[in-house]
Image (cartoon, rainbow, N blue to C red):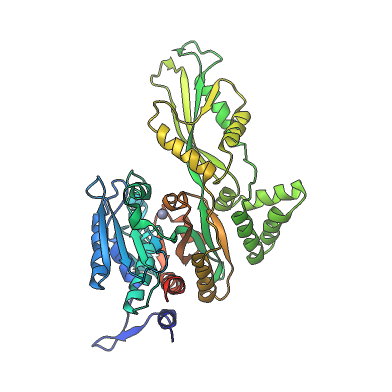
Amino acid sequence: MKPSMLFKLAILSGVCLILTQQGTAQRKQDPTADLLIELIRVNSSNPPGNNRDLAELLAKKFRALGVEVEIIPTPDAEKVHFIARVKGDGSKKPVLLAAHGDVVGVEREKWTVDPFAGTVKDGYIYGRGAMDFKGGIAVFAEAIMELVKNHVPLHRDVILLSEADEESGLYNTSWLAKSHWELMDCEFALNEGGWIMKSANGGVQYVSISTGDKVSIPLLLDAKGTSTHSSMPRPDSAIFTLSKAMAKLADYQPPVELIPSTREFFETLAKTSEPPLSKYFDDLVNGKDPKVIQEADREISKNALLHAIMRNTFAPVFLKAGFRGNVIPGSAEATLNLRVIPGSDLEKFIAEIREVIDDPRVDVSLPSGDNPDAARVQELVREAESLKSSNTNTDLYRALESSAHSTWRGRPVTPYLFQAGTDATAWRSRGIPVYGIYPYPITPEDLTRMHGNDERVAIESLEQGSAMIYQTLVQVASK
Ligand SMILES: [Zn+2]
């Protein structure tokens, strides 16, 4: 029997029970779950994003197995990139698994458990990063260590990269790619992204693998008026002008834009959902009558995630106006956060926003000139316009697909456009395919906790995810 099968059987047969001296049955935890608890206990909230201790923890585990590791310092002494490389015979280019080691901060008082304790409760592990993305580090690392323990002969290197500054900060994978590209060069990579979504009956409904990420770009609205004494209001108040523009935007819905991966994703949902939703998904993709499509859009858009992936979106994130109680300010500013489908015509989208506002007193522009975001925004605009979704015609995508099918009994696998951003651009911009997955089955409710409170992942899901990723690696990298 192939080692992959052995491993899979061992972990799918459920948690083992061991007998203590007193003869009572005690739960022996899954190694992926154990590793995740350790990772959660290292607080790597970003900001400040210190992840050196996390890298040291991983280094110890891999060194113990004789695997080559490297900790790459950044200009910030507490932020590092961690690389473990399991050597193949070099006949094929490496496969790389990327998992960011920083996490977003917490509103501690809103958690019912300590977010940095890795509490086990009701079959779940709770803690910041449980889903995003320390769970991913644990699954990827465990699957790779299993390859080493089973002495699987490899024809390509298998690389684990746990990176810094994905959630914010300067020293992310784009920084790493500029200075250390040779360490992260590969044929294809796996990263965070798509979902293994459970349905109401507890089974897996579908597996989505992201092949592209939306691009996040700030857009500035600047309304002008007369600055004067507040005792003599005039009709040209900058605050009122901006408010009217914002009210128009609040009522506006950008049109549906289905790229091929989104189309395939909705077709999968049409096949795996209950009516009436299944019909709405089908109407959205195949409908001819604009009214029917509009109704489908309205119903599907009740789900904020689905609403987001089928269109470019904008969301107000900052407002700035006024400085004294007795002065009418001469300007009022808002920042919109645009989330753009890669390959979109950004200028057209901005023109659409101008048209909705329809007021020459409101200037609509991207940060430019001496704005500190100007250079970064230029880069984002290039990304939004030029990045292509990763091609699914690769050994890695096929391996993900077939291991997902065998782990979750033929449930459908579909490409997916990730609604947020990840640090996959370092590879995609160099033409290297990146596929995204949160490698554990989750419920829609689990998903709302990501970047929120009481973030968690089911232990059973971690076990299944490790089996699936192990099988993927065996398929794509073993001789
Ligand atoms: Zn993440």
244 sits left or right of 366 in the view: right
Query: Which residue is farthest front?
Result: 91
- Residue located at (40% from left, 28% from top): 371
Position of residue 99 measured from the top left corner of the image (x, y, whole percent): 38, 59
- Residue located at (55% from left, 73% from top): 405
Q: Quadrant of residue 343?
A: top right
* Quadrant (top left/top right/bottom left/bottom right) for the C terminus: bottom left
Position of residue 246 measured from the top left corner of the image (x, y, whole percent): 55, 31
56 sits left or right of 278 in the view: left
Q: Nearer the viewer, residue 377 or 315?
A: 377
162 sits left or right of 63 in the view: right
Residue 30 can be seen in this image: no
Q: Is residue 469 above or below residue 387?
A: below
Q: Quadrant of ligand 1?
A: bottom left
Q: Nearer the viewer, residue 69 or 250?
A: 69
- Residue located at (35% from left, 52% from top): 181
- Residue located at (26% from left, 73% from top): 65
Position of residue 64 measured from the top left corner of the image (x, y, whole percent): 23, 72
Residue 34 can be seen in this image: yes
Q: Is residue 406 above or below residue 369?
A: below
Q: Nearer the viewer, residue 125 or 162?
A: 162
Position of residue 187 measured from the top left corner of the image (x, y, whole percent): 44, 61
Q: Nearer the viewer, residue 275 or 40?
A: 40
